[in-house]
Amino acid sequence: MSYAVVVHEVYKKFGKPAEPLWQRLLKTARPNHNGNGTHAAPGENGSGNGNGNHTEAHFTVAVDHVSFEVKEGEIFGVLGPNGGGKSTLIRLISTLLLPDSGTVSVFGYDVVRQSMKVQERINRVSVEASFFKKLSPMENLLYGARLYGLEGKATRKQVVEILTRLGLERKNIGSPMEEMSRGMQQKVAIARALLSHPRLLLLDEPTTGLDPRSKREVQEVIRELRQDYGTTMLLTTHDMVEAELLCDRIAIMDKGKVVALDTPPALKLRLPQTGGKEATLEDVFLALTGKQLKSEEELETT
Ligand SMILES: Nc1ncnc2c1ncn2[C@@H]1O[C@H](COP(=O)(O)OP(=O)(O)OP(=O)(O)O)[C@@H](O)[C@H]1O
Ligand SMILES: [Mg+2]
């Protein structure tokens, strides 16, 4: 079995001291009495977490010892509540962030030591894709194509093909990006990522903000990509129906940890049937991220 992505014990935290350096230096020089006769410790000025853990008080653990593998040709979903760590994980895989510890490899290449090799094989679509807003989709995509070393008439034809396949009207292909709706801009972002024919496509909420028809068009393109080119995809979404429809396996992340990883049918079996009806993926998501369901370790021991 060859793996497209191997994530091993990855840990990433963000943060900075709550106070600027000059304030901390001032405090050290002139101890600040807090009214009860004791000196205020760092993190006790109202911004701490109140658990006495002053070192970690100002840090956010975004990805907390996460491990999983994505098989070649798989569509792997990552679900989780806001702030669960999904986008951070995608940035780590796409070499945009460095892990604090743990390793990530993409088609056998380490994202830290062999980042160029990784970048040649991947592309990423994020919810906040950036463009030259005064330029048209055609101009933005031709610019992007040039960065991948693609030029000429064939590229221009390919741009039109991809954009129309994604449901963009021909009249929009030549108008400025700033005149397009967010959903239309999202489609252009997907088209741009497809130009480089990535072996691994990282899709961070690719259908967020799209109307139902556009959503379907994008979902169809995702399925076709795997079918026609065997593209491996790792995708995040808040749409449970989409996750079930597209993904071979799904990892559910909560507070930086993977709390479940399985196929959609197996995930649904984790909850008992109610009134003879099978649980939905949304039920499972809510139960897992609401802490009402048994943890994976508990399930293994039962
Ligand atoms: N650049 C950053 N600096 C500081 N904290 C960050 C940064 N990026 C993410 N975080 C924090 O890391 C945690 C995980 O964020 P992340 O964006 O990965 O979550 P997410 O699962 O993608 O959420 P959403 O569903 O809202 O997109 C959050 O607490 C977030 O505030
Ligand atoms: Mg996100």
Image: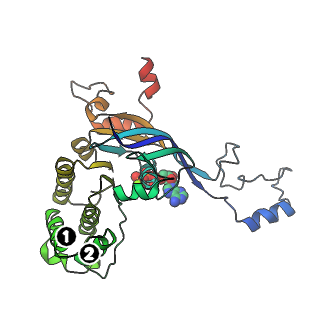
Lateral position of residue 101 relative to residue 253, left or right: right
How many numbered circles does the render carry? 2
Query: Residue 170 placed where, x, y %?
Result: 13, 74
User: Which quarter of the picture shows residue 27?
Assistant: bottom right
What residue do we see at 29% from left, 52% from top? 199
Q: Residue at x 29, y 37 (%)?
A: 281
Label 1 sits on residue: 159
Q: Residue at x 20, y 71 (%)?
A: 155
Q: Nearer the viewer, residue 188 or 301?
A: 188
Q: Is residue 238 visible?
A: no
How many angstroms separate mark 2 from mark 1 (CA)? 8 Å
Residue 274 — which label? none
- What is the three-letter code of the residue carrying label 2? Leu
In the picture, measured across the screen, residue 219 lies left or right of residue 64, that is left
Above or below, 282 against 83 in this view is: above
Q: Position of residue 190 (x, y in %)?
A: 27, 62
**What's the mark number on residue 142?**
2
- The earlier-in-sequence mark between 2 and 1 is 2
Comparing 232 with 246, the one in front is: 232
Instruction: Relative to 42, say whether 264 is above or below.
Output: above
207 and 11: which is toward the camera: 11
Verify CB contact (< 8 Å) between mark 2 and mark 1. yes
Q: Quadrant of the N terminus?
A: top left
Near mark 1 (Cα within 10 A), the count class, few <14, some 14-19 or many ≥20, is: many
Residue 254 visible in the shown view: yes
